[in-house]
């Protein structure tokens, strides 16, 4: 396989991944239990490596752009998004611990991951630095 063929194959794979992530992010907009921003950031990553046109489309999209533009430009997570994210993670952890019969090791594992993710989210800046 030539280098050009490999590059084309990789580009198409990344674009396909990007579109799958856009679709999952769109589902997340209407379903409160499905994350949106994570999938849109993954799509942004895939498009940035495969298609400048699709990358620009995603950033400038009236529906998807606002979810990810702040992150790409300034690496910030707005305070409102932090509150929503941590609230949803807390609710998910509580539901898993109190509302299911999940094994204790699963509960501790998932809650540990949620605490790690929440810590990361909370420690990101909420506004661009001057």
Image (cartoon, helix red, strand yellow):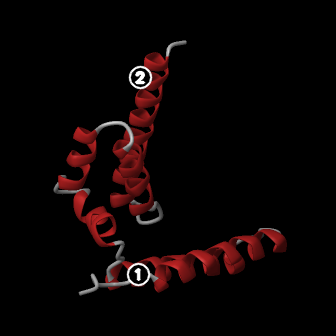
SS at mark 1 in the image: helix
Q: Quadrant of residue 130?
A: bottom left
Q: Residue at x 44, y 36 (%)?
A: 14
Above or below for 70 versus 31? below
Above or below for 77 versus 58? below
Q: Residue at x 55, y 12 (%)?
A: 1
Return the x and y of residue 10 as percentages of the image width and height: 47, 29
Q: Residue at x 19, y 52 (%)?
A: 61
Spatial separation of the CA atoms under disc 2 and disc 1:
38 Å
Q: Quadrant of residue 74?
A: bottom left
The answer, for residue 27, to whether it is visible in the render is no
Return the x and y of residue 113 as percentages of the image width and height: 66, 72
Q: Residue at x 39, y 48 (%)?
A: 43
Q: Earlier in the sequence, mark 2 or mark 1?
A: 2
The answer, for residue 75, to whether it is visible in the render is yes
Instruction: Using residue 64 as the reference point, say whether residue 100 is left or right of it.
Output: right
Q: Which residue is mark 1?
A: 82
Residue 8 circle label: 2
Return the x and y of residue 4 as percentages of the image width and height: 43, 18
Return the x and y of residue 3 as percentages of the image width and height: 48, 19
């Amino acid at each position: 396989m030539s280098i050009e063929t490999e590059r084309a194959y990789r580009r198409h794979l990344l674009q396909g991944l990007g579109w799958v992530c856009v679709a999952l992010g769109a589902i997340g907009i209407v379903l409160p239990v499905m994350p949106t921003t994570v999938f849109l950031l993954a799509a942004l990553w895939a498009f940035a490596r495969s298609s400048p046109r699709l990358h620009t489309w995603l950033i400038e999209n009236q529906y998807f752009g606002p979810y990810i533009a702040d992150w790409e430009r300034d690496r910030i997570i707005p305070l409102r998004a932090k509150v929503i994210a941590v609230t949803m993670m807390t609710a998910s952890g509580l539901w898993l611990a109190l509302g299911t019969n999940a094994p204790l090791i699963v509960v501790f594992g998932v809650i540990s991951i949620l605490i790690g993710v929440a810590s990361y989210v909370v420690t990101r800046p909420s506004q661009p630095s001057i």
